[in-house]
Structures are given as C-alpha cells and as structure tokens.
Image (tube, grey):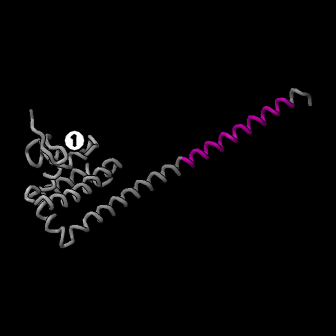
Amino acid sequence: MDWDQVATISQLVTGAATLAVAVFLATQLRIQRKDSERAHRDSEREILYTAQGRGQDLMRPIMTSDFAPIWTKGGQDFDSLTPVEKEQYRAWGYSFMMLQSVNAQAGHEGLDRGVESRIRVQTEGTWTSWPGLATYYEQYGRSHTYNPDLRALLDSIFLEKFGREIDTTWHWGVQKTVS
C-alpha cells in the first residue's frame, strides 16, 4: 500500500470513529434530557405534596377549641373580630395566602382535570363559605400577594363575587386616606 491509500483508510477510520462518538454523545444527551425531565416532574410532584401537607397543617389549628371560634367568626365577618382575634386570624390568613402564592408561583394552576384554574375554583368556594377571608384579602392579603397575575386573578374573583372593585386604599391593614 502506498501512502495515499493509508491516508484514505486513516481518514475513513477517523470519520467512522467521529461518527461513533457523535452517536454516543447524542444518545447521552437524550438520556440526560429524559433524566432531567423526570427530575423536573419529581420536583413538581414533591412541591404539590409539600403544599398539600402544608395545607393540612394550616387546617389543624382550626380544629382547636382556642382558635376554632375565632376562625368561624372571622370567616363570616372579619370586621367583627376583636383586635387580639384579628391578629390570630391574620396569622392564619397570611399562611393561607402564602400557600396560595406558592401554588400559583409553582405553576400548578392547570394540573386539575377539567378545572381551568384551581386557585379560581378554591377561592370562589372559600369566599362563598367564608366571606370574612375576602375581607382579609382586601385589607391585608392583597398587600402581600406579590405575584401580579395572582393578584389580578383574586381581584377579578372579588369583583365577580361581591359586585365591586377591591378597595385599593388598604395597605397592610391600614386604610390610606385619598387626597
């Protein structure tokens, strides 16, 4: 064999080796992508489980003889609570709103079959049963609802449910005077 033939064979071997490496890397990338997608689904599921557990934890104080009457009274009429009761109800309401914010931020809105917005359905039901929580949202909760999409959704539910716009002069429980 002369040198041209050796060079040609070397180039063919090099080309085949390069192709084999490319196939191997493509296969590795595909496996890595599938692993990444699986890990993402696992983390989403873990967030949902954690949020569900947090929701259950949030409901436990309602069952106590100390907080149940406050929760019941505040759920019907937030403004009827004494200052001490309001503080207790506010602590519960803050936790509830933070849980809602986490679920919204995590993108779990469309995970329920047949429900366009889990938060919409839950909020409509909650505010129907416990209108005092809507008052809490207007006076306090809106102030710490930092996600603008969630705030717009909750504001639209408030408008539909109560037939009026949110009074935006409330900020962290203090009503600003309009000048």
Q: Residue at x 21, y 72 (%)?
A: 64
Tell how many labels.
1
Q: Residue at x 87, y 26 (%)?
A: 4
Q: Residue 92: horizontal and vertical position, in percent?
A: 23, 59
For the record, the magenta segment spans 6-32
Between residues 158 and 12, which one lies in front from this camera angle? 158
Q: Residue at x 9, y 32 (%)?
A: 179
Between residues 5 and 84, which one lies in front from this camera angle? 84
Q: Which residue lies under the disc numbered 1?
A: 152
Of the 4 image quadrants, the one containing the N terminus is top right
Q: Is residue 122 above or below residue 168?
A: below
Horizontal side of 33 relative to 131 (left or right) equals right
Which quadrant holds residue 53?
bottom left
**Residue found at the very far front of the displayed protein:** 84
* Residue kind at label 1, given as amino acid type: Ala
Binning the other alpha carbons within 10 Å of mark 1 as few (below 14), some (14 to 19) or many (20 upward) gives few
